[in-house]
Image (cartoon, helix red, strand yellow):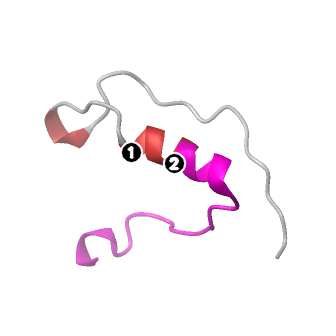
Amino acid sequence: PEWLQGKHTIFGEVADDDSRRVVDAISAVATGPGDRPIEPVVISSIDIASV
């Protein structure tokens, strides 16, 4: 989308169903002004794998 151009890095792939559930949960959090989460969303760890 045009609004992402030059503002965000987009990369990656959801590896499996468990990971998809995490992504879906993050996308479902309540948001307030500016579409920001009302409560902080923290990703405490990730795994990076070569495919």
Q: Residue at x 62, y 61 (%)?
A: 14
Tell me which amino acid carries mark 2: Val
Mark 1 secondary-structure assignment: helix
Residue at the disc numbered 1: 27
Whether residue 46 is situated above or below residue 12 in the rendered picture:
above
Q: Which residues are magenta?
A: 1-21
26 with respect to 43 (left or right): left
Q: Residue at x 43, y 63 (%)?
A: 8
Could you say which quadrant of the image residue 26 lies in?
A: top left
C-alpha separation, residue under disc 1 versus residue under disc 2:
6 Å
**Quadrant in which the N terminus is drawn:** bottom left
Mark 2 secondary-structure assignment: helix
Residue at the disc numbered 2: 23
Could you say which quadrant of the image residue 16 lies in?
A: bottom right
Whether residues under marks 1 and 2 lie with C-beta atoms below 8 angstroms apart, the answer is yes
Tell me which amino acid carries mark 1: Ser
How crowded is the residue under tag 2: few (<14 C-alpha within 10 Å), some, or many (20+)?
few
49 with respect to 14 (left or right): right
The image position of residue 35, as x and y in percent, is 22, 41
Q: Residue furthest left?
A: 33
> Is 34 in front, or is 30?
30
Whether residue 43 is situated above or below residue 14 in the rendered picture:
above
Q: Does residue 19 belong to the magenta stretch?
A: yes
